[in-house]
Image (tube, helix red, strand yellow):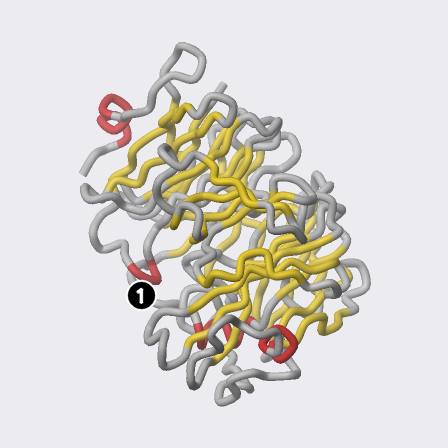
Amino acid sequence: MLNRRSFLLSSTAVLLKGEPVKIRAITKAPGLHWFGYYDKLQFDPTSRHVLGMQVDFEHRSPRPDDVIQLGVIDTGQGDKWKQIGETRAWNWQQGAMLQWVPGSRDEVIWNDRVDGRFVAKVHNVKTGRTRQLPAPVYTLSPDGKTAIYPDFRRLNDCRPGYGYAGLPDPNKEKLVPEDAGIWRMDLASGRNELLIPFSEAARIPYPGGYSNGAKHWFNHLLYNTDGTRFIFLHRWRGDKEGTSFSTRMFTANGDGKELYILDPYGKTSHFIWRDPEHVLAWAWHPSKGEKFYLYKDRTEQVECIGPDVMTVNGHCTYLPGGRYVLNDTYPDKQRNQNVFLYELSTGKKVPLGSFPSPKEYTGEWRCDTHPRYSPDGRKVVIDSAHGGTGRQMYLIDLA
């Protein structure tokens, strides 16, 4: 296994501004550390403080009694770790939805399980005070005032690795519940309401019809860049899908109205909003098959992006300024996870690093790199298990 020094010497990282990209570990053993999903705010507005999670085991599903620690890393003071809380509501892919509250320099939020229900906790890193909200969160509006969230109990039943252990789904035997789906919560008052029940989405016809015994769920929710609309994936599994699932990508107004099927073809995967009207997503389209496509919301306008460069599925975001797409890959044939930038104007691919993934990191407890950028666009943090000490977080310096 490569240590950090030998990895830096053998890295395929190339040049952004005439100098090698610098990579360093910002967490270390004995704890195991990661952040989770690529579309959450891991950096504070100063681009100095980085959120992370710590656990003491790997390679199995979380159990209801498993507790993980949450912390802030000061990258300007020797990558010092400061614990800020703990949680019993987490998974390997997206953690506990730990993230900075948009627009705040001091507040972070995460999900937890307390007294038989999933909740969210808002913590002020300056005062040390924590307040509790009556429901969990998934994605926050850009103004930091509102959250939307799916049924994490159903997610844990339908898609292990994305829901939380500890609470059974009361609708487990129902294929299309009417009293659950996507909720909205006011982050100041905690007031919440059901916006889109499963039954509402399922009533919208799917070409060819749903397979026999199709069980429906929602996940991957994300507000657009001005908070006027949000995206979600409607998924189901029946006799036809077997162990897999089918997918439709929906958009909706902030109040859950004006639903629009942006991708009806059944294979939407990772996505990101470029601006209030455009979505970049890995999907299948009859024009070029499985590729990255740029969709214009509430229209049939679709453009293939990087068809000969971004040729495999990955976790995509736009760096500030919109010049580059930050992306990665799943392990290739050599089990390397490749992190790179794609320059939109030239079609050029700029590799940032190739990170070996040990073979035991697979399935639900795999360690995807999920690259996340800093607000100033000069840093990227990834999760990786290449260093020989289990999953840790690494900072890539683009400056």
- Position of the N terminus, as image quadrant, is top left
The image shows residue 349, relative to residue 27, as above or below, that is: above
Look at the image and tell me whether residue 72 can be seen. no
| Image coordinates for residue 167, horizontal then vertical, percent | 52, 79
| Image coordinates for residue 9, horizontal then vertical, percent | 24, 21
- Classify mark 1: helix, strand or loop: loop
Residue at image x 77%, y 63%?
A: 255
Question: Which of the pair 104/328 is nearer the observer?
Answer: 328
Could you classify mark 1 by the number of other residues whose Cα lies within 10 Å: few (under 14), some (14-19), or many (20 or more)? few
Question: Which of the pair 253/133 is nearer the observer?
Answer: 253
Residue 265 falls left or right of residue 242: right
- Amino acid carrying label 1: it is Arg
Residue found farthest to the bottom: 173
The image shows residue 310, relative to residue 324, as above or below, that is: below
| Image coordinates for residue 66, horizontal then vertical, percent | 43, 68
Residue at image x 30%, y 61%?
A: 363
Q: How many marks?
A: 1
Question: Which of the pair 212/24 is nearer the observer?
Answer: 212
The image shows residue 248, relative to residue 125, as above or below, that is: below
Residue found farthest to the top: 18
Residue at image x 22%, y 26%?
A: 6
Residue at image x 60%, y 76%?
A: 198
Q: To which residue does mark 1 refer? A: 60
Look at the image and tell me whether residue 76 can be seen. yes
Question: Which of the pair 47/155 is nearer the observer?
Answer: 155
| Image coordinates for residue 37, horizontal then vertical, percent | 49, 50
The image shows residue 37, relative to residue 17, as above or below, that is: below
